[in-house]
Image (tube, grey):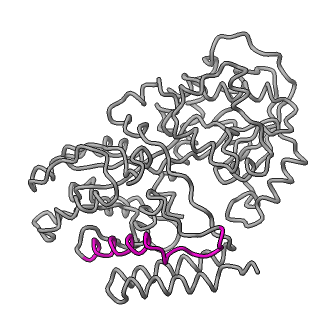
Amino acid sequence: MRAAFLRARGRSLAMAVLAVGMIAASSGCIGKSQPPEEPTELTIAFINQMTFDAFYGSAFQSVYPNTSFKIVPLLDPVYSSNNPDFGVALKEMFETKKPDLVILWDAQYKYAADAGWLRDLENMASLNKFDLGTLHEGMLDRARSNEEGKLYGLSPTFNSSAVYYNKTLFQRYGVPLPDQDMTWDEILRLAGLFVDQPEGEDGVRGLSMKSLTKPFYLMSDIAKTEGIEMYDKVANRLAFDSKAWHALISNVTAAYQRGTFVAEPYKTKGQHIGLDEMRDRDLFAQGKAALTVESDYYVTELKRLYVDFEWGVLPGPVQTRDPSRGGDISVDTMFAIPADSGHPKEAWKLIEAVMSERMGEVFAERDFGLPVRLNGRMAKNPLYEVFYKLRPVPLQAEYSIGANEKEELMKIIEDETDAATAGRKSVDDAIAAIQEAGSRLLPDRK
């Protein structure tokens, strides 16, 4: 839903347009080692043929010039994680289409890994002397986010968020510049220092996030960073009545009521938000917000806008109990080899090709995500190196609930936390209402 804004996935169409030129530039540049014996055909499960040709076709063809690549399309909604039975469809695809290589979205990858359908790549990397230590640890952590904690996939790119701050505003208001990785609590406290003049001549806010349309979205981001679970998987119940959630909701409610940040609904109705509205909401780029939390792609946006103030970037927000983790690290697609692949060695060569240093440079040039190679120029760039410093927080447990029930539950959670921040309800009453809804909507396992 709103994750599309947080991770700038809206640029996928632009990437598709650029991809043909991107991959063509890389053709023939994937190493100089002796090519392996070439198969006649390899079957690859991916979005569709057109996207494969645009993104990876030339790179793969440079490895196997005389091989045809048969694409098993995964664009059908039955493979979407929004479909409660997508695992059934995915299983049927593995069993009937028998792909040699799969390129999966994160939810598909985790399901396939937990189901035991994928080959352990740790062994293949070792046998082929592929140094995993040259890759961003955050991507490897995400790849190991499965029940066994094994490396069943690799991704050539990742995305992350960081804390952006307006140096000019900090100096104008006499607030000390942030000089270290900050937790969410520290960000809210620092942002609160700008609220003493909430209606100042510049209308400055301490914190602004253009995707923040409801207070619960900020609460959810904080919970994700701090590892505060919304759902107790063992007991099959919501966990909003915990001390951690009570403190989190209370802190965000207080910050909202003080004016530290504003949660403003989109003016546009429906699924599509116009660029003009997104620009209007971007108070940081307008020089009217001291702090924001945005994706790595925001660096490119600020450069293109030629903003007239000094700004900096810090890793984070970081987790309180483990400051080495945070930053909302995500991986869109994973390259994996099915356990029953008929051509595992050949599939590995394709993964090596897409994970190459040259391809990393091409991805960097085209804003295709952050290359995972630690020896690449992006990882050493002062504006981007902050995104390589943190490891991801472990993923939260998913609700044991259908799509419609989940949508209804989220609406209740948003409405109740809206009521708390607006002062129409106490935090205790809002939490009680959320828990009651959870007991009604979550299925009884008895």
Q: Which residues are magenta?
A: 234-257
Of 129 and 406, the residue lying toward us:
129
Q: Is residue 33 above or below residue 89?
A: above
Name the side, left or right, on which 88 lies relative to 196: right
Whether residue 236 is in magenta: the answer is yes
Residue farthest along the right direction in this orientation: 96
In the image, residue 94 lies at what x, y percent?
A: 84, 47
Q: Is residue 210 above or below residue 24?
A: below
Name the side, left or right, on which 269 lies relative to 192: right
- At x 46%, y 66%, the residue is 220
- At x 58%, y 34%, the residue is 156
Picture quarter with the C terminus: bottom right
In the image, residue 380 lies at what x, y percent?
A: 38, 27
In the image, residue 393 lies at what x, y percent?
A: 50, 51
Name the quadrant containing residue 214.
bottom left
- At x 31%, y 41%, the residue is 303
- At x 47%, y 78%, the residue is 414
Name the quadrant containing residue 6.
bottom left
Name the side, left or right, on which 356 lies relative to 325: right
Picture quarter with the N terminus: bottom right
Dominant secondary-structure state across the stretch colored magenta: helix
Whether residue 344 is in magenta: the answer is no
